[in-house]
Amino acid sequence: LDSLLLQDWVTIAATSGVSQSTNSALDISNYEDLVVYSETKQLTQSDTLLVLSTAPSRDDASFAPMVRPIVLVAGTQVTSILAVYANIPPARFLRWALATVNTEETFSVTFRIWVAAYSLSVT
Amino acid sequence: MQSLILQPWTTIHRIAGGSFDTFTQDAEDWLDVSGYADVVLWLDVSDITPIDATIQFSFQTAPNAEDTFFSQIAPTVTLTPSPFPQIIKSIRGNTPLGQLLRWQMSLFDNPSSAPSWGATFRVRAVPYRQSFFGPLAIPGCALWLRSDLGITLSSATTVQGWLDQSASQDPGKSLAQSTGSAQPGYQTNDQLYNGNPSLLFASSSSNFMTSSSWATVLAPPCTWICVAHNSSIGTSQQYLLDGDDTTFGQIITYTPSSTTPNVAVTVGGSTISANLALPGWTVPTALLAEVNGSSSAIYFNNFSTAAASGTLGSTGFKSMTLGSHSQAFGGGNYWDGRVAELMAFNRILSSTEKARLRNYLNGRYGFGMA
């Protein structure tokens, strides 16, 4: 088990979806299971979504969401992504993206993401 | 996990006709995946020729390089140009991964009679040391229908066959519908089901599918699980499935009432039922029914707290009509909604087994189950 920082504290304000750059995507090639801890300090829109995506290479179009988007709330949220059960298991790279249901309004969110990464199953 | 290149970007063109209509990857490019349990394949397609052709792609595995040993590890994929990859999973419980992995492509349909055909594509393979879970890992799986496995389409959007994936070896358990107008629709990349496909049953079109009589009656105690939802609001009872073509006996039904939407399981003349919170079964939901005499129960999604319990009869399931009352009684009460997965076990499952199935369904469909 290793603890990996996917995203240190950051505040994002935008009117449309935002993705972590592919260069910043986390290399998780040594791991098969992930537990993602997202901590949100503030958010202006209650429909702000966190999308956790994976891809076998760092090209933007390859990233696919592993789980349904997570509706962010203030505080810590924990999401397990186990290769055994995941619809799309973690591939080599992991990154986050933000989206909102209401694309008309500016949203702002302050958050960080830590990942507990397991090289063996945690079933 | 490693990310391996099974096939770098390549363009392959073939002359149409005869043996030229199938092409297998060159042996020197096959991947050695020894040491791994399962694999996820990321298939990118940028172009197909001619554009109206149906070109199918399969992934095959074998314990050595002899051609006769190669078998398919995942459903056949129809190539579609897209900026995004198609993602295909093997499941060790269905087809174990051998030492070698390769692809094969074939021309399935060439409506414009084009003289040549081909595609531009790449394939990345991500192998895993763990096996992906599938219902066959639970002993006693007597029936397993999943919307991406064993589907036969009569057109791009209608289903005429749905093959049972269980190890029962009973061809009578597979579903079919030969009448075009009664065939359910097929929704690929259904966002309601987390991007997985689903079968669309429209009551207005009287869609349903039936099996033959089963070689072995599925007698209680047994467990049924289905992943589905319903699109209608009304007072008429709708049949998700009818497990008996000779009596009114073994059924799972839903009444989409605007005040008290209700799921009922009836076996051998006895019924237990559970009301759903409004608006009812309008979103994809996993239903688990334990048919176990006086200890029978219905669960929704979490599989740990029963929504209803009571007594059901001991009559067995002998066949199946999906989406309708048995046609032996003229059909009717057609399902108006979608179905993504259906399974049955020949016993009552332990809490650990139910938890594993809950995790599997939650991961696949993203129910957000507790």
Image: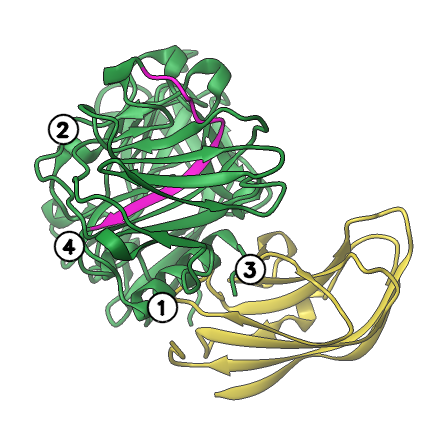
The Cα atoms of the two marked residues, 3 and 2, are separated by 37 Å
Q: Residues within 10 Å of mark 2 (few under 14, many from 20)?
A: some
Q: Which residue is mark 2?
A: B213
The Cα atoms of the two marked residues, 4 and 3, are separated by 43 Å
What amino acid is labelled 2 in the image?
Answer: Ser
Q: How many marks on residues?
A: 4
Q: Earlier in the sequence, mark 4 or mark 3?
A: 4
Q: Earlier in the sequence, mark 3 or mark 2?
A: 2
Which residue is pictured at 57% across the width and 39% down the height? Answer: B260
Q: Which residue is mark 4?
A: B65
Which residue is more in the foreground, B286 or B10?
B286
What chain is the green one?
B
The answer to whether A108 is drawn above or below residue B287 in the figure is: below
Q: Which residue is mark 3?
A: B368
Res B349 → quadrant: bottom left
Residue B369 position, x and y percent, is 51, 61
What amino acid is labelled 3 in the image?
Answer: Gly
Q: Residues within 10 Å of mark 4 (few under 14, many from 20)?
A: some
Q: Which residue is mark 1?
A: B128
Q: Earlier in the sequence, mark 3 or mark 1?
A: 1
Which residue is pictured at 42% across the width and 67% down the height? Answer: A83
Which residue is pictured at 53% across the width and 55% down the height? Answer: B366
Q: Which chain is disc 2 placed on?
A: B
Q: Earlier in the sequence, mark 1 or mark 4?
A: 4
Res. B292 visible in picture = no
Q: Earlier in the sequence, mark 1 or mark 2?
A: 1
